[in-house]
Image (cartoon, rainbow, N blue to C red):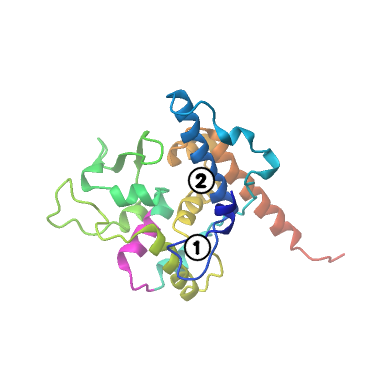
C-alpha cells in the first residue's frame, strides 16, 4: 500500500504518481493472487485479510470525458502527423472498440452480411466475449486501404502503444481547439454518449459496446442527464 501511494509511473516523461483508482486495481489483483495461493495450499492464510478497510486504497469518483459531435468534426478536420492514430481514434468514436481490440483487428474480422453491409466480428480482449457490430459509413471511412493485405494482416498495423498514444493525443485535441483531457478510451465513451444522445435505447447501446452488464451502460445515461442539467443551469435570470 505504501509502495502504490509513493511510486511513480515508469512510462510517464514527467514525475507522475499512480492514480487512486489504479492503486485499487493493483491491490485487488494482488489480493486475488494471494487468495488463489490459499486455494492451492501454497499459503495457509491471505495476509491481506488482516488489513483494515480504512487502510486499503480507495477508489475516487472520476468524470468520464467524452467528445461532442461538433468536437469529433473538429478533430476530423484537423491535421495530425500520426495518420494511423487519427484514423484509429475516429474509428473507435464511430464503433466503440477499445484500443486493445483495434490493435488486434484483422481484415478477416470484417465481413459483409447478406445485405452487403460491412460487419465487424471479434472476440473482445478484455472479456473474451464474441461480438458482431454493423459498421456505420463514418466508421468505414476511417479504415485504411486494404490493397493486397491478407485476412490475417492487421487493419491498423502500425498503431503505436497505448501509453505513447495517450501522451500525444492532447496535441491533436489542442490543435483542434478542444480543451479536454483526451485519452484513447475517450473515443469509446464518445461512442456510447453519442448513441444515447441520438436516441438509441440502453439495451442496444449495451450490445454495441459489448457490455456483459447493462448497469455499466447506465453510467453513460447518467452522464447525458448531468450534461442536460448543466446546460439548463446556464440559462440566466431574465424575468
Indicate the quadrant where residue 161 lies: bottom left
Which residue position holds label 1?
182
Q: Is residue 234 above or below residue 55?
A: below
Outermost residue, right side: 239
Is residue 119 rendered to the left or right of residue 78? Answer: left
Residue 134, percent across and down?
A: 35, 42
Residue name at image x 50 percent, y 59 percent: 69
Image quarter of the C terminus: bottom right
Residue 84 belongs to the span the image colors magenta: yes
In front here: 115 or 118?
118
| Residue 197 visible, this angle | no
Is residue 223 rendered to the left or right of residue 106? Answer: right
Mark 1 element type? loop
> Mark 1 or mark 2: which is in front?
2
Q: Is residue 149 above or below residue 8?
A: above
Residue name at image x 27 percent, y 56 percent: 156
Residue name at image x 14 percent, y 49 percent: 150
Residue 183, percent across and down?
A: 47, 60
Cβ–Cβ under 8 Å for marks 1 and 2: no
In front here: 20 or 35?
35
Q: Is residue 136 above or below residue 131?
A: below
Mark 2 element type? helix
In front here: 25 or 100?
25
The region drawn magenta spans: 79-91
Mark on residue 44?
Answer: none
Mark on residue 26?
Answer: 2
Amino acid at each position: 500500500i505504501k509502495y502504490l501511494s509513493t511510486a511513480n509511473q515508469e512510462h510517464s516523461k514527467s514525475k507522475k504518481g499512480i492514480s487512486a483508482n489504479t492503486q485499487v486495481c493493483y491491490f485487488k489483483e494482488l489480493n486475488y493472487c494471494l487468495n488463489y495461493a490459499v486455494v492451492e495450499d501454497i499459503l495457509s492464510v491471505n495476509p491481506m485479510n488482516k488489513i483494515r478497510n480504512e487502510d486499503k486504497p480507495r477508489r475516487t469518483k472520476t468524470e468520464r470525458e467524452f467528445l461532442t459531435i461538433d468536437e469529433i468534426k473538429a478533430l476530423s478536420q484537423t491535421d495530425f502527423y500520426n495518420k494511423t492514430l487519427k484514423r484509429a481514434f475516429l474509428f473507435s468514436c464511430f464503433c466503440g472498440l477499445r484500443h486493445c481490440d483495434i490493435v488486434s483487428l484483422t481484415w478477416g474480422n470484417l465481413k459483409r452480411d447478406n445485405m452487403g453491409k460491412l460487419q465487424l466480428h471479434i472476440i473482445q480482449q478484455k472479456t473474451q466475449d464474441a461480438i458482431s457490430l454493423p459498421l456505420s459509413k463514418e466508421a468505414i471511412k476511417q479504415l485504411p486501404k486494404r490493397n493486397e493485405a491478407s485476412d490475417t494482416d492487421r487493419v491498423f498495423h502500425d498503431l503505436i502503444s497505448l501509453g505513447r498514444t495517450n501522451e500525444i493525443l492532447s496535441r491533436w485535441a489542442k490543435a483542434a481547439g478542444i480543451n479536454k483531457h483526451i485519452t484513447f478510451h475517450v473515443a469509446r465513451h464518445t461512442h456510447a454518449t453519442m448513441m444515447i444522445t441520438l436516441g438509441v435505447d440502453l439495451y442496444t447501446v449495451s450490445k454495441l459496446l459489448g457490455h456483459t452488464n447493462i448497469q455499466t451502460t447506465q453510467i453513460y445515461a447518467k452522464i447525458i442527464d448531468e450534461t442536460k442539467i448543466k446546460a439548463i443551469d446556464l440559462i440566466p435570470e431574465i424575468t
